[in-house]
Image (cartoon, helix red, strand yellow):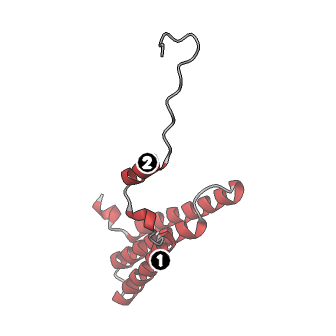
Amino acid sequence: MITLIADPRFIDVILALVAVEAVGLLGVRKLSGAGPAPLGFLCTLLAGAFLLLALRFALAGASAYAIAGCLALGLVAHLADLSLRWSPASANDAQSTIGKQTAIAQARPKAAPSAPGRGSRVRA
């Protein structure tokens, strides 16, 4: 089992599966219009693919420059993914969900108690 994992060709199979995943997700997005935003998931897949490529180069005995280059490109893809996901903090983000629910409940006016309906046994 360890010889299979240590074989660089095993990483090639995983990289091929990553490519199939990317094409499949892009195809589903094109056909149905549903699914994740293409730029976001492509950045995520690229970051992982560069890490796998760095591992493949390390297992194959490639130069340290090739490995470092893959790691650097993986970092760039990861930072691009983070920048797409990052949203600026707003004043509402500072409150917890419980605090938001409490504020909403306090902002709503309370309904006046309803008068007893006809046929009610309560007499005023």
Q: Which residue is mark 2?
A: 106
Residue occupying the point 50% across, 44% down: 109
Q: CA distance from mark 1 to mark 2?
A: 45 Å
The three-letter code of the residue at mark 2 reads Gln
User: Quick one: label 1 or label 2, which is nearer the N terminus?
Assistant: 1
Q: Is residue 52 above or below residue 27?
A: below
Residue drawn where x is 69% and y is 53% of the image: 32
Q: Residue at x 46, y 68 (%)?
A: 90
Where is residue 121 shown, x and y percent of the image? 49, 9
Q: Residues within 10 Å of mark 2 (few under 14, many from 20)?
A: few
Would you place residue 61 above or below residue 1 in this image? below
Q: Position of residue 41 (x, y in %)?
A: 53, 66
Q: Which mark is residue 77?
A: 1
The N terminus: image quadrant: bottom left
Which element is circle 1 on?
A: helix
Nearest to the observer: residue 109 or residue 16: 109
Q: Tell whether 73 sits left or right of 58.
A: right
- Disc 1 residue type? Ala
- In the figure, is residue 118 to the left or right of 15? right
Observer-nearest residue: 123 or 44?
Answer: 123
Name the residue nearer the viewer: 94 or 76.
94
Foreground of the two, 36 or 101: 101
Residue 5: x %, y % from top left: 34, 63
Say few, some or many: other residues with alpha carbon within 10 Å of mark 1 (under 14 / 14 to 19 / 20 or more): many
Q: Nearer the viewer, mark 1 or mark 2?
A: 2
Cβ–Cβ below 8 Å for labels 1 and 2? Answer: no
